[in-house]
Amino acid sequence: MPPQKPADSTIYQFKVTLRDIKPPIWRRIQVRSETTLGKLHDILQVTMGWFDGHLHVFEIQGRQYGRPDPEFDWDVNDASKVQLSQVVTGEKFKFLYIYDMGDGWEHEIVLEKLLPADPETHYPTCIKGKRACPPEDCGGAWGYAEFLAAIQTPTHPEHESMLEWVGGEFDPEEFDIDGINEVLEQIGS
């Protein structure tokens, strides 16, 4: 597939790590510098394995960016109008992405490298990662630990109900980079 943007575009390589989970769940992604925070939200939903059913916010140098929603008094800067190059200042720059305010999934995002675009690569792309994303609505890091204990222990009183709730099976070590990149190809930068 031909690139959608000029080959001279700068590529940001980020490491995205879900906080408060051991062993860590993380992804390494590459996106164009002109990608908006709104589009980065879409990319993170795919690469982490979320389903975009909850509010989200980026916290960058004391400012919050998300989808403004006056109906819910959600007063944030509009993420769809801000490009990464406007808020990410250089390598090692860190910021937060928080998804699902109830469960409070905090993702630390670190800009690892600035790279020239490869004309043969479709961006955004996920180049590496570890472990499956927790299921939606499992109760945050604490709830996820309880969920894992239940599904991994056949004698646990909630073993069967948790397996049924998650659709029959869940492998916390699974990471499907090819499946992620197939979906990312549909997103575009």
Image (cartoon, rainbow, N blue to C red):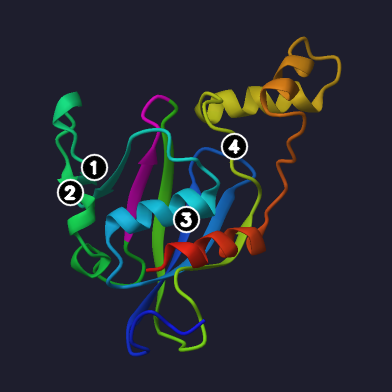
Q: On screen, 75 above or below 30?
A: above
Please tell me which of labels 4 and 3 falls first in the chain. 3
- Residue hosting label 1: 67
Q: In the picture, residue 4 is in which quadrant?
A: bottom left
* SS class, disc 2: strand
Q: Position of residue 41 (x, y in %)?
A: 37, 51
Left or right of 57 in this view: 82: left
**Which numbered tag is attached to residue 16?**
3
Q: Is residue 95 magenta?
A: yes
Alpha-carbon span between mark 2 and mark 1: 6 Å
Please tell me which of labels 4 and 1 falls first in the chain. 1
Please tell me which of labels 2 and 4 falls first in the chain. 2
Please tell me which of labels 2 and 3 falls first in the chain. 3
* SS class, disc 4: loop
Give the residues drawn in magenta, as a range. Answer: 94-102
- Given the image, on which type of amino acid does mark 2 rest? Asp
- Residue hosting label 2: 78
Q: Please report the residue visible at 57 percent of the width from the left and 23 percent of the height from the top.
A: 143
- Given the image, on which type of amino acid does mark 4 rest? Pro
- Given the image, on which type of amino acid does mark 1 rest? Arg
Q: Name the residue at the right extreme.
A: 154
Secondary structure, magenta segment, majority class: strand
Q: In the picture, residue 134 is in which quadrant?
A: top right
Q: Position of residue 151 (x, y in %)?
A: 76, 25
Please tell me which of labels 1 and 3 falls first in the chain. 3
Please tell me which of labels 2 and 1 falls first in the chain. 1
